[in-house]
Image (spheres, rainbow, N blue to C red):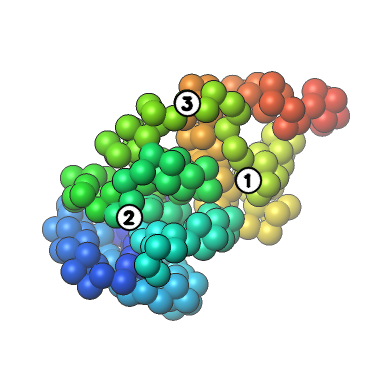
Amino acid sequence: MAADELITAVIVDDHVAIAAGVRLWCSQAVPPIELVDAGDRLADVWTGPGALADVVIFDLELAPRRPDFGELRRLADNGRRVIVYSQHTEDTTAIKCIDLGALAYLTKREGPEHLVPAIRAASRGEPYTAPSLSGALVANDDPGRPRLSQREIEVLRAWFVSSSKELVAVKLNITVKTVDTYIARVRVKYANVGRAARTKSELVGRALDDGLITLAELNSL
């Protein structure tokens, strides 16, 4: 996305005051960010202006004491670029949201100085690490491999054996933007376990180490 291109975001949050505050922050951003307010209507993320938004700002708990990890997974699996904006401050919740495919996790204590740059990063398919997420990552004592979704693995494998992301998009019937989003999420998951993979060749190496693809498959090209 070009630096001067208009960014659009859709917010799903049942608190009117939260949505109003985010709308004000977005309008005051330079350049401004266009915000679509879906209220608590998840359907509005999939239809109308919300379906075309670059970024989804998602309140994890639209129903009391029922965090909707399933909807977060659905959004991520469909290539949507999601920022979870939640009242939950538990490290385990933040880590789970990143594992499910969110590009950023912010608590509602974190204001425009973090939400606005997180929206800009997500619009480019890039992760954003706010203080709450940074603390969760430091506290995370799981040294294992990153937990990749089946769709992330599918996109990754297709990219490794294709000469371009355009070919991956055609093969999997998704957009190039969605391909970029999946790859960005895989990169952040590897970075979060201390195994950064900034280039395609480094990512291939990580995948070989973890058994996601074999040398025979790569050599068959």
Q: CA distance from mark 1 to mark 2?
A: 22 Å
**Residue 151: x %, y % from top left:** 66, 49
Camera-nearest residue between 73 and 78: 73
Q: Quadrant of residue 95?
A: top left
Circle 1 — which element? loop
Query: Callout 2: few (<14), some (14-19), or many (20+) C-alpha neighbours within 10 Å?
Result: many
Query: Callout 1: few (<14), some (14-19), or many (20+) C-alpha neighbours within 10 Å?
Result: some
Circle 3 — which element? loop
Return the residue at label 1: 149
Q: CA distance from mark 3 to mark 1?
A: 20 Å
The residue that appears at 45% across and 54% down in the rendered structure is 81
Q: Which mark is residue 141?
A: 3
Camera-nearest residue between 1 and 86: 86
Camera-nearest residue between 104 and 218: 104
**Residue 132: x %, y % from top left:** 30, 39
Camera-nearest residue between 55 and 210: 210
Three-letter amino acid code of the residue under disc 3: Asp
Which tag, 1 or 2, sits closer to the chain's start?
A: 2
Q: Quadrant of the C terminus?
A: top right
Q: Taking the image as drawn, is residue 183 in sight?
A: yes
The residue that appears at 59% across and 55% down in the rendered structure is 77
Three-letter amino acid code of the residue under disc 1: Ser
Return the residue at label 2: 86
Query: Callout 3: few (<14), some (14-19), or many (20+) C-alpha neighbours within 10 Å?
Result: few
The residue that appears at 53% across and 48% down in the rendered structure is 100
Three-letter amino acid code of the residue under disc 2: Ser
Circle 2 — which element? strand
**Residue 112: x %, y % from top left:** 19, 50
Relative placement, left or right, of 216 versus 170 is: right
